[in-house]
Image (spheres, rainbow, N blue to C red):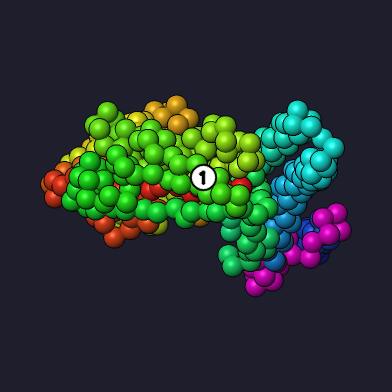
Amino acid sequence: MATRINYNYEAAVTYTSLIQNERLMNKSLLRLSTGLRILSAADDASGLFIADQLSLVSTGLDQGNRNIQFAISALQIAEGGVAQIYDKLKTMYQKAVSAANDINDPNARAALQRDIENLRDAILKIAQDTEYNGIRLLNGSFNNVRIHYGARAAQTLSVSIASVLPQQLGGYVAESSPATISDPAQNLTDLLTNNAAYTVDNGDSLAITFGDGTTVTLNSLNQLGYDLNGSGTYILDASAVANTINNNPTLQNKGLRAYAENTSIASVAFDGNSINVQDSVTITFYVGGSQVFSKTYTSTPTLDQIIADINDASGGKLIASKDSSGTKLVLSTPNGETISVEVTAGANSSVDLGALLQGAQGNTVSGGNTGSAVRVGTLTLK
């Protein structure tokens, strides 16, 4: 008996058309609901690529705008701090004018001077502590900070805020410059012995002469420097000189104040090129005449690691941080004390002293040698 297969061609065509229409309808509804013309690469491969690139750029621009808002917030905080300092400076000016009046007796003038000193201390506090997200804004370290405002790598701008520390404001009677000495093959004692300008000896003195003929002479070892770790070698120190001047009654009556400051921004980046530890390297830091940090490394430390090590060991006597590029070591002392470093490198290790102290670049300690560097801070008289 013959077998027959029934097939309804018209129904099959109708069903296929229905499925196609349903798919087109779903795609149209999806486009309407999302607002997107291209839903997948099947719609327009090149168009989808272009759209994705534009979306990526848009995301970068959005983040750049947020970066700008963060920067504006930081600058507004800095502006507020500067406004407070300006108000205090105006008050200081007012009191100085008041003190110039000869109707005031010595006690009144002394009271006005105390007020001025309190205002100065308040300015110092504002300048040191004003910060945004842990970044100091007014102490001079906010320098060449990059703000990334766009979607491209080069779309940045640089922002700097000058220091408003009291010793950086207004005029001054005299100001010294910071100075650094270094040698890759001399320990710290030998370096100082061979560079008399950085040490204090019996017979050395500092004389301050005023227009009325008054002269004050500082001539003791402790008045000009600190004994280096009890060695009997006195290292010149701006902080010691400032303390001596500020505690001298004659100079106090003359209204002379001294300020010491010492900040070192390493001359070269802290990386594998400047510090290479294959066996061992011992790094020792001194502040004034006292050792505040010493550690032996058996592998090359990172910048973050040595910053943490210094801050943990020094107890605030030596403050370590990064510069704005994030590649250089920044060291400072609370009162402007001299910073010294001594490095002993193993036979197969090397250390460029410029990675540890500003002005010491090009002096590489290696081959089992001991090298050292000394940086004396700035002394300002006002």
Q: Which residues are magenta?
A: 32-53
Residue 51 within the segment the image draws in magenta: yes
Q: Is residue 116 above or below residue 35?
A: above
Nearer to the camera, 105 or 62: 105
| Residue that mark 1 sits on | 215
- Residue under the image location 53 percent in, 53 percent down: 175
- Residue under the image location 69 percent in, 35 percent down: 117
What element does badge 1 sit on?
A: strand
- Residue under the image location 59 percent in, 41 percent down: 257
Q: In the rendered structure, which amino acid carries the disc numbered 1? A: Thr
Q: Count neighbours of disc 1 (C-alpha within 10 A) and say few if under 14, some if 14 to 19, many if 20 or more.
A: few
Residue 87 within the segment the image draws in magenta: no
Horizontal and vertical percent position of residue 109:
76, 34
Q: Is residue 20 above or below residue 50?
A: above
Q: Quarter holding the N terminus?
A: bottom right
Horizontal and vertical percent position of residue 133:
65, 40
- Residue under the image location 39 percent in, 39 percent down: 219
Nearer to the camera, 57 or 198: 198
Q: Quadrant of residue 136?
A: top right
